[in-house]
């Protein structure tokens, strides 16, 4: 379990670095391509460290080791996967894969844990593959699936790095 957590933390940090690099180097309107987007919801959910129905309490922009991130303070209303006392600090790298969260709104959030104190998420770690996973818009099927979620052993799929596809205008 410690080995898996260490690998996932490393992957999440690399995702942050790549996401911020792609923002600088990608054209305006770049699109996020998420490698975890296919397959059963239970496979994706079990590949993640945490899933929570959470309320955003505050939002701030920061630069950490040269990487721009948006940080959020969360209040976890219900934890579906992970330790019931999840960290309250959520970090999302700025870029085309970033989630767009607003203060005082409830969301279905999910992702990886870095260093036991920080949650990492992005569109690629969202169970809905959306940048705005608003709780009251989560399909009933997903709510049911995460309520009944049982994960045995290691994930059947492994989180991999997102890629960015630039939007290129098509001319006649």
Image (tube, helix red, strand yellow):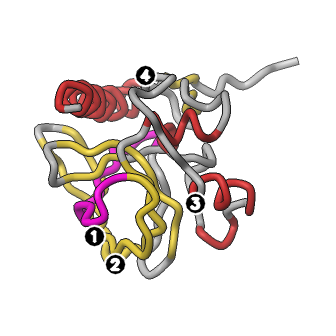
Of the two numbered discs 3 and 1 on the same chain, state the one appearing first in sequence.
1
Mark 3, secondary structure of its residue: helix
Residue occupied by mark 4: 160
Answer whether labels 1 and 4 touch (C-beta < 8 Å).
no
Rendered location of residue 138, percent (x, y): 67, 62
Of the two numbered discs 4 and 2 on the same chain, state the one appearing first in sequence.
2
Q: Residue 73 carries which label?
A: 1
Of the two numbered discs 2 and 3 on the same chain, state the one appearing first in sequence.
2
Q: Which mark is residue 57?
A: 2
Mark 1, secondary structure of its residue: strand
Mark 4, secondary structure of its residue: loop
Task: Please state which of the two labelled residues, at mark 3 or mark 4, is closer to the viewer.
Answer: 3
Residue occupied by mark 3: 147
Answer whether labels 1 and 2 touch (C-beta < 8 Å).
yes
Q: Distance between the residues labelled 3 and 4?
A: 25 Å
| Few, some or many residues within 10 Å of mark 4 (<14, 14–19, 20+) | some
Residue range highlighted in magenta: 82-97
Answer whether labels 2 and 3 touch (C-beta < 8 Å).
no
Is residue 7 visible in the rendered image? The answer is: yes
**Is residue 91 shown in magenta?**
yes
In the displayed structure, does residue 57 sit left or right of residue 41? left
Mark 2, secondary structure of its residue: strand
Q: How far apart are marks 1 and 2 (CA)?
A: 5 Å
In the displayed structure, does residue 15 sit left or right of residue 147? left
Q: Which secondary structure is most common in the magenta stretch? A: loop
| Few, some or many residues within 10 Å of mark 2 (<14, 14–19, 20+) | some
Q: Residue at x 64, y 28 (%)?
A: 167
Answer whether labels 4 and 2 touch (C-beta < 8 Å).
no
Of the two numbered discs 1 and 2 on the same chain, state the one appearing first in sequence.
2
Of the two numbered discs 3 and 4 on the same chain, state the one appearing first in sequence.
3
Figure check: 38 above or below 52: above
Q: Distance between the residues labelled 2 and 3?
A: 24 Å
């Amino acid at each position: 379990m410690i080995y898996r957590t260490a690998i996932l933390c490393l992957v999440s940090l690399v995702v942050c670095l790549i996401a911020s690099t792609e923002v600088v180097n990608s054209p305006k309107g770049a699109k996020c391509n998420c490698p975890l987007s296919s397959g059963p919801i239970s496979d994706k959910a079990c590949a993640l460290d945490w899933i929570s129905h959470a309320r955003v309490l505050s939002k701030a922009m920061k630069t950490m080791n040269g990487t721009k991130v948006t940080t959020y303070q969360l209040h976890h209303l219900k934890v579906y996967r992970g330790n019931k006392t999840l960290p309250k600090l959520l970090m999302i790298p700025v870029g085309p894969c970033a989630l767009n969260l607003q203060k005082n709104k409830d969301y279905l959030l999910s992702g990886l844990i870095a260093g036991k104190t920080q949650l990492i998420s992005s569109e690629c770690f969202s169970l809905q593959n959306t940048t705005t996973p608003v709780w009251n818009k989560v399909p009933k099927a997903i709510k049911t699936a995460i309520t009944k979620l049982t994960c045995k052993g290691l994930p059947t799929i492994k989180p991999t790095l997102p890629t960015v596809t630039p939007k290129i205008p098509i001319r006649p």
